[in-house]
Amino acid sequence: MLHRARSRRGAAPDRRRQPLSVSQKDIAPTGTAIELRLNAEDPDNGFRPAPGELSRFDLPGGPGVRVDTGFTAGDRISPFYDSMIAKLICWGADRDEALNRAQQALTELRIAGIPSTVGLHSRNLANADLRAGAAHTRWLKRLLGPS
């Protein structure tokens, strides 16, 4: 059995050295993407990790919306690993469209059973400074105030 697997693997063409069918000059970036990390953390309590059971986990969808996750409703978020539940990635033809899609996706997203950063992301996406592109590396800390 092991021998067959090896010979099948060995029979496949070696694609590591094949040239790509396009070059960088053939690729034109378009649009904007926004990524939101959805964590099992309590933003109102210093982002304290919040392990527990995801009693509800309904994901958004639609054009330009992608969710990367390894969890489903009923799964437990462990206290021993990263608190990230999912990444919500929203693409739009421009920044406003990407932000609007992210805001809409958050209204469709349902997480229950544990605190999460979803509410914080919703508030941030509604913030005029963020919408205007005035957010910076210390923006959120200033917005939240002393912890």
Image: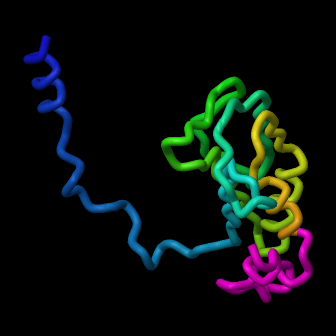
- How far across and down, in percent of the image, does residue 101 sit? 83, 59
- How far across and down, in percent of the image, does residue 124 sit? 84, 69
In the image, farthest residue toward the left: 3
Q: Which one is in front, 107 or 11?
A: 107
Decide: is 134 above or below 53: below
In the image, 2: left or right of 145?
left
Quarter of the picture holding the N terminus: top left
**Residue sitting at x 91%, y 81%:** 128
Quadrant housing residue 31: bottom right
Q: Which one is in front, 132 or 27?
A: 132
| Scheme of colours in the image | rainbow
Q: How many numbered callouts?
A: 0
Decide: is 75 above or below 36: above
**Residue sitting at x 68%, y 67%:** 33
- How far across and down, in percent of the image, does residue 40 sit? 68, 47
Q: Which one is in front, 67 or 19?
A: 67
Quadrant housing residue 35: bottom right
**Residue sitting at x 80%, y 43%:** 60
Residue 140 magenta = yes
In the image, 137: left or right of 26?
right
In the image, farthest residue toward the top: 1
Quarter of the picture holding the C terminus: bottom right
**Residue sitting at x 77%, y 28%:** 55
In the image, 68: left or right of 24?
right
Residue 52 magenta = no
Quadrant housing residue 10: top left
Residues shaded magenta:
126-147
